[in-house]
């Protein structure tokens, strides 16, 4: 039986993408070769990479002021690449501390210049989105649009910021329409909403580059990757192909419908969390993430019981992050409403049995 996968990442992927990817591993486009054995510089793979880059720009309505890269190293590599490329030695970057990932990003930036924490929700274990403000004096403002571990999300994005905005969108990339042209740089590890682990999407406004006066090692220099068409070294070809297929899947639906579906799924689950006497949500209602719903059982002994109960209904990978505990249901784009309904039904039945 196909399980209903609520994993926070690597997470659920569309079934049609998995099937096409599996086929490409065996025989790519009838070439008599696997996708895994052809040159990344061959025309068939270049079509994949360029197709993925074009779809990213189309989905986010971006023009040639922006460049799209698919790099290795995960989102964590971007924690250092961003300040390496954008933060001058005597400059200050503004960071909003909304969780562990945001904190890690800011710590890396401190290796390159000054960091101002312009907002933090650490005082209440990251259960809300804090107020924050950046200024023209900041080299950039760094935000994490969705906090995968805690289950909070920025529902209001900082459009019209006085300085360029850099966003870690690892766990809500392409989950809703955004004004992408209001961002200086967007990055996201693919393994939640866009494909498998191994590829990291970077969308960068080119005019921001080359201004730090710092020498940058080639592999960490966005300009080098741009000059080489995102092929300075061998890119993660299989991960990029899966991203391409997923981007096509997203484009067929459109970001409005994707957002609408995501809202419906989240509403179904949060309504049940609030209604059911055996469960509570972890974070402030206004900050609740549409991507990662975090909750817990009100009675500690129910935790393992419910995990088992949900698993018997086919729902897996619901365990909360090890630093938070409780449960976390990740509702990425590829999760459908029927999958969430199975979880909600399991919660209702659990209440009938143990309430
Ligand atoms: C918001 C966010 N940023 C960064 C990361 C780190 O990503 P990676 O493992 O690709 O380095 C994660 C991983 O879950 C994440 O959720």
Image (cartoon, rainbow, N blue to C red):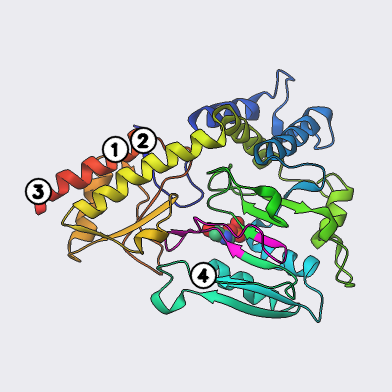
Q: How far is mark 1 from mark 2, CA to CA?
A: 6 Å
Instruction: Classify 221 as above or below 84.
Output: above
Q: Mark 1 — residue?
A: 341
Element type where label 2 sits in the image: helix
Give the mark nearest the N terminus, 3 or 1.
1
Image point 60% across, 64% down: which residue? 143
Q: Mark 2 — residue?
A: 337
Instruction: Classify 230 as above or below 19.
Output: below
Figure quadrant, ligand 1: bottom right
Tags 1 and 2 touching, CB below 8 Å: yes
Q: Mark 4 — residue?
A: 100
| Residue 226 in sight from this viewpoint | yes
Which image quarter is the C terminus in?
Answer: bottom left
Nearer the camera: disc 3 or disc 1: 1
Tags 3 and 2 touching, CB below 8 Å: no
Element type where label 4 sits in the image: helix
Q: Give the magenta-colored segment's residue range.
A: 143-166
Q: How far is mark 3 from mark 2, CA to CA?
A: 24 Å
Q: Is residue 286 left or right of residue 310?
A: right
């Amino acid at each position: 039986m196909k399980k209903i996968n609520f994993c926070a990442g690597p997470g659920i992927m569309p079934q049609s993408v998995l099937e096409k990817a599996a086929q490409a591993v065996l025989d790519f486009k009838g070439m008599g070769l696997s996708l895994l054995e052809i040159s990344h510089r061959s025309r068939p793979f270049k079509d994949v990479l360029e197709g993925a880059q074009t779809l990213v720009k189309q989905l986010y309505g971006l023009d040639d002021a922006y460049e799209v890269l698919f790099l290795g190293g995960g989102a964590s590599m971007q924690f250092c690449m961003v300040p390496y490329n954008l933060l001058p030695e005597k400059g200050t970057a503004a960071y909003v501390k909304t969780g562990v990932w945001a904190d890690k990003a800011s710590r890396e930036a401190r290796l390159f210049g000054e960091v101002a924490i312009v907002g933090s929700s650490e005082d209440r274990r990251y259960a809300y989105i804090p107020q924050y403000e950046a200024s023209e004096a900041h080299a950039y403002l760094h935000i994490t649009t969705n906090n995968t571990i805690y289950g909070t999300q920025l529902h209001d994005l900082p459009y019209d910021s006085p300085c360029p905005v850099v966003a870690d969108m690892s766990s809500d990339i392409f989950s809703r329409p955004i004004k992408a042209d209001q961002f200086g740089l967007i990055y996201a590890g693919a393994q939640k909403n866009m494909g498998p682990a191994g590829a990291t999407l970077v969308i960068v406004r080119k005019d921001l580059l080359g201004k730090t006066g710092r020498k940058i090692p080639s592999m960490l220099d966005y300009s080098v990757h741009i000059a080489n068409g995102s092929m300075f070294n061998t890119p993660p070809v299989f991960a990029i192909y899966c991203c391409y297929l997923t981007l096509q899947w997203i484009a067929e639906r459109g970001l409005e419908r994707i957002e609408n579906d995501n809202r419906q799924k989240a509403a179904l689950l949060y309504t049940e969390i609030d209604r059911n006497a055996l469960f509570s949500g972890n974070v402030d209602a206004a900050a609740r993430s549409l991507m990662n719903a975090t909750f817990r059982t009100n009675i500690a002994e129910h935790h393992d019981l419910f995990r088992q109960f949900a698993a018997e209904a086919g729902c897996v990978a619901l365990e909360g992050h090890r630093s938070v505990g409780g449960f976390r249901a990740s509702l990425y784009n590829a999760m459908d409403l029927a999958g969430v309904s199975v979880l909600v039904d399991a919660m209702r039945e659990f209440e009938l049995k143990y309430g």
